[in-house]
């Protein structure tokens, strides 16, 4: 299999990151398989109009993740596929997204519009996730304060009962001494 990268400069995503994403996508969809050779850094750089170091940076990141192996003088080879998710081609989620994309395109949105809408939605979910984490942290802090307040109150109550018991014992001893 020959991998053809396509760099979209207007996307706002670094070229090396797009190479990583496209390689992983090709693996998830079965377009690339373990043992396949990727284009050389020079070949990919020429095809994508990027610096060869950009391609090398992507390949090194993929190597760090254990997905490819750079073999000096031979090329870069797929050594393992990333884990497949339920969103792979043919899954119910993929079918839903495909149907939605078709409706969006039929409604007159361009491919770029669809991409931007999906990215915006993902960003909203990331922001919501961060807000949820923040709320969770605040909720835990509040609960921790309440728990500590209850413990403090329990200690005070126990101290007060202990003091009352000691006072009662002293008074009982004093009455006994007074009657003797």
Image (cartoon, grey):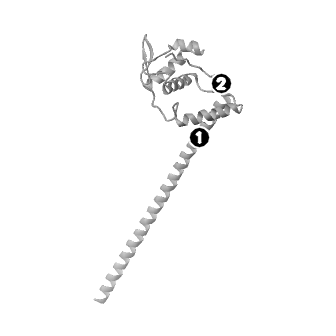
Q: Picture quarter containing residue 164? A: bottom left
- In the foreground, 82 or 32: 32
Locate residue 136, reporting x and y percent.
52, 49
Say which quadrant the C terminus sits in. Answer: bottom left
Query: Residue 110's image quarter?
Result: top right
Left or right: 139 in relation to 109: left
Q: Residue furthest top?
A: 73
> Does 180 sit left or right of 128 as displayed?
left
Residue visible at 40% across and 69% down?
159
Q: Position of residue 160 (x, y in %)?
A: 42, 71
Q: Residue at x 60, y 20 (%)?
A: 7
Q: Is residue 32 above or below residue 109?
A: above
Classed neighbour count for the residue bearing mark 1: other residues with Cα under 10 Å, few (<14), some (14–19), many (≥20): few
SS at mark 1? helix
| Badge 2 vs badge 1, beta-carbon distance below 8 Å | no
N-terminal of the pair, mark 2 or mark 1, is 2
Quarter residue 81 falls in: top left
Residue drawn at point x = 55 percent, y = 49 percent: 135
- Residue tagged by mark 1? 125
Q: Residues within 10 Å of mark 2 (few under 14, many from 20)?
A: few
Which residue is farthest left?
A: 180
The residue to which callout 2 is attached is 10
Q: What x and y, as percent, mark residue 174?
A: 33, 83
Measure the alpha-carbon separation of dots 2 and 1.
22 Å
Residue 9: x and y in percent read 63, 22
Q: How many marks?
A: 2
Could you tell me which residue is drawn at 50 percent across and 52 percent down? Answer: 140
């Amino acid at each position: 299999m020959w991998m053809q990268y396509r760099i979209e400069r207007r996307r706002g995503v670094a070229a090396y990151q797009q190479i990583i994403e496209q390689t992983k996508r090709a693996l998830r969809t079965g377009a690339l398989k373990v043992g396949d050779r990727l284009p050389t850094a020079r070949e990919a750089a020429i095809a994508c109009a990027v610096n060869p170091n950009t391609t090398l940076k992507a390949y090194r990141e993929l190597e760090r993740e254990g997905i490819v192996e750079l073999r000096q003088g031979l090329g870069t080879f797929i050594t393992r596929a990333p884990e497949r998710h339920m969103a792979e081609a043919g899954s119910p989620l993929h079918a839903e997204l495909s149907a939605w994309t078709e409706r969006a395109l039929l409604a007159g949105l361009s491919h770029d519009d669809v991409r931007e809408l999906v990215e915006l939605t993902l960003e909203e979910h990331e922001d919501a996730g961060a807000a949820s984490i923040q709320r969770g942290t605040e909720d835990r802090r509040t609960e921790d304060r309440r728990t500590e307040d209850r413990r403090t109150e329990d200690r005070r109550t126990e101290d007060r009962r202990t003091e009352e018991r000691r006072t009662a014992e002293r008074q009982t001893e004093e009455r006994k001494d007074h009657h003797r």
